[in-house]
Amino acid sequence: MNLNIENEFKAGLIFHKEGNITEAETKYKKVLAIEDNHFDSLHLLGVVKSQKGDYKKAIFYIKKALELNKANPMVYNNLAVVYMEMNNYKEALYYCNMSLSFDNNNLEAIYNKGRILSEDEDYIEAEILFKKLIKLDPNYYKAYLSLGILSFTQGKTELSINYYNKVIQLKPDFFDAYYNLGNIYLDLEKNDLAELNFIKALKCDPQNSQVYNNLGNVYKNINKIEEAKVCFENSLKYNSSDTKSFHNLIDLHLQISDWSQIQNYINSYDSIEKFKELGVPVNIHVIFDRPDYQKYVNETFLSYSGKLEINNFNYKRKINSKIKVAYFSADYSDDNPVAYLISDLIKFHNRDKFEIYGCSLKGTKEKDSTRKYYEKYFDHFLNIQNLTNKEIEELCILQKFDIVIDLNGYTKYARPDLFSKKLAPIQVNFLGYPGTLGSKMYDYIIADKTVIPPQYTKYYTESIAYLPCSYFVNPKQRRSSTKKLSRQELGLPLDGVVFSCFNQNYKILPNIYEVWMRILKRVGGSVLLLSHTNQLAKKNLKLEAEKKNVNPDRIVFGEYFRDIGDHLERYKATDMFLDTMPYNAHTTASDAIWAGIPLITCIGKSFASRVSSSILKSVGLEELITQSLKEYEEKAVQLALNPQKLIDLKLQLTNQRSKVTFFNSELYTKNLEKAYEEMHRNFYLGNPSKTFEI
């Protein structure tokens, strides 16, 4: 070899090993300027280009190297890596196999082939390869890491934890193992172990924004609000474009009722295009009364739509003897509003026409009363938490479901990617998420003409299945309390009007709170009873009252009642429920009406801002629906200053409760079943989904 070429190549190799790929590239190019068919320089220049993300040139140089030496397993493997980076797994697998054809025990090629098979959800073959790696080299820590990822993907959480601990045993300073362990424990709600592993991950990589973000979520879970705030701020400090932390920080501000940045945050989204730059708000329904924004965000950023899988569900297939309906939810447990709301619906389904499945996306540590209830009342209750998406898809096709109901949407513990390939001929968005999911995989959304007026259907990717009353489902009965809670016991004045709002305080925005303060000032001796919340939120809400010249003692926070009966009994000590805007009361509005408490709402444009109006219409109290915050304020004050009118409304609600359609869960179930039958009939006629009314 020419001495000059040899020296330049060796220098490039040293730079490359040190991670200085820019200087390495310069040296390899110098070699090729002298000898354009220098095999090693072509090969490694291709590797450098891959490391820089220039995959087109990486392929060009590595393939040129292959023309000179077609029997080098390392070159084939590196070409496979380039295609993996491009998500072209078909080509990547081909070149992995080529590498292994020359060296069947090439560790890196075996490892990469295992990763490709994992991406293709061929978990059995991938696991065989990773275990082969360990036999060839018991210290090959990346094999244990991959087995950890593979096990977690398949729901084998404990096995996954064991593999990650093995990685740490072999390589105590390996960031990925601590980070992945932290994420597992965060998912399991084992916050102490999640905190421990994230802190260890930060010792390996002290400026990692993702770790700070996730550690912030841990602290938020355990109510260490200040620590959570610092973590989100550090995440943004080390990566100012980390949109998750940006939104988590604002979400935290909402949870502690710190509104110092809220208006700036809202102003930053002055056009739809800003979502590309700023990302998706944690809860868009709280901030914006803009159905156009919500559709754009859900279609563009949150939708998991894949290619429509029509081959699985040809309308000419054999029809089941009964319509098979499967309700998918992560919320079949105590203290969850969706599980509470659909209890009668599941019980009252007509088993002569329907076969009803419950598919649980999240287990419980112990079977609580809600879990036991649903295991009893579903015809079949399937715990699918630990199944992969592919396994669930196969299960659904095997069971021949006709209609799949998604009760989660984009809420906590949801698996929206699960529905990106249709699990049944008909997929329905229902109840859990107040708006469009923006995915073509969903055929229908269950609604009524108040939450989605005909002029707003353009903001929904789903066809609308309109129910005749409110779409909002309720149990026929509520649990009664054994207590009689007096105002004195609840820390309320014996005299004067008690306004209430039991929505979570993140729904309380500055504009609605300002209206509430004006109402308190105009109604002497009145107080506002709010839901139990964190200490910082209590402090901030009282400070805001003081700023508005309202005695902070007039803001009262209720204690947390685990028993729903006690919670409903507390409503009776109040006079009027003041709704939030733009994210209305939903379950809490239903509870207020059940307890006989009038509710004042301001109707908006988005689904979430029209739910209370839907409820009020269905119980004959349209007079309590207002069109502006000014009208809302006047209505609340006039009603508060007219005690007889308040008494009459309370009596009307209490006396009519058993008669109004809103609480007739048998009738609701029949109407929903008619909707399911229409969806089913339409599909078997070979028609696409279409909006219809019951």
Image (tube, grey):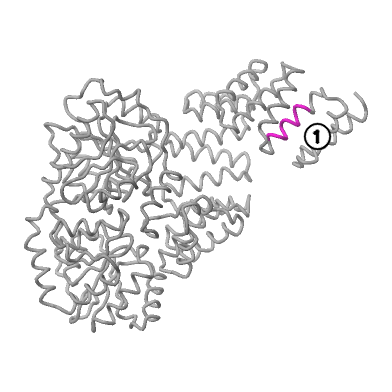
Res 670 quadrant in image: top left
The one nearer the camera, 1 or 604, is 604
Q: Under tag 1, what secondary structure?
A: helix
Residue, x 33% and y 31% (percent of image)? 423
List x then y, in percent, for residue 356: 20, 35
Instruction: From the viewer's perspective, tell me whether residue 195 is left or right of residue 466.
Output: right
In the image shown, does 441 or 352 lie closer to the viewer? Answer: 441
Q: Residues within 10 Å of mark 1 (few under 14, many from 20)?
A: many
Q: Position of residue 643 (x, y in %)?
A: 13, 78
Please, what is the three-letter code of the amino acid marked with disc 1? Leu
Q: Is residue 253 above or below residue 324?
A: below
Magenta extent: 42-50
Q: Mark 1 points at which residue?
A: 13
Residue 341 in sight from this viewpoint? no
Q: On screen, 223 above or below 382?
A: below
Q: In which quarter of the image is residue 376?
A: top left
Which one is in front, 404 or 113? 404
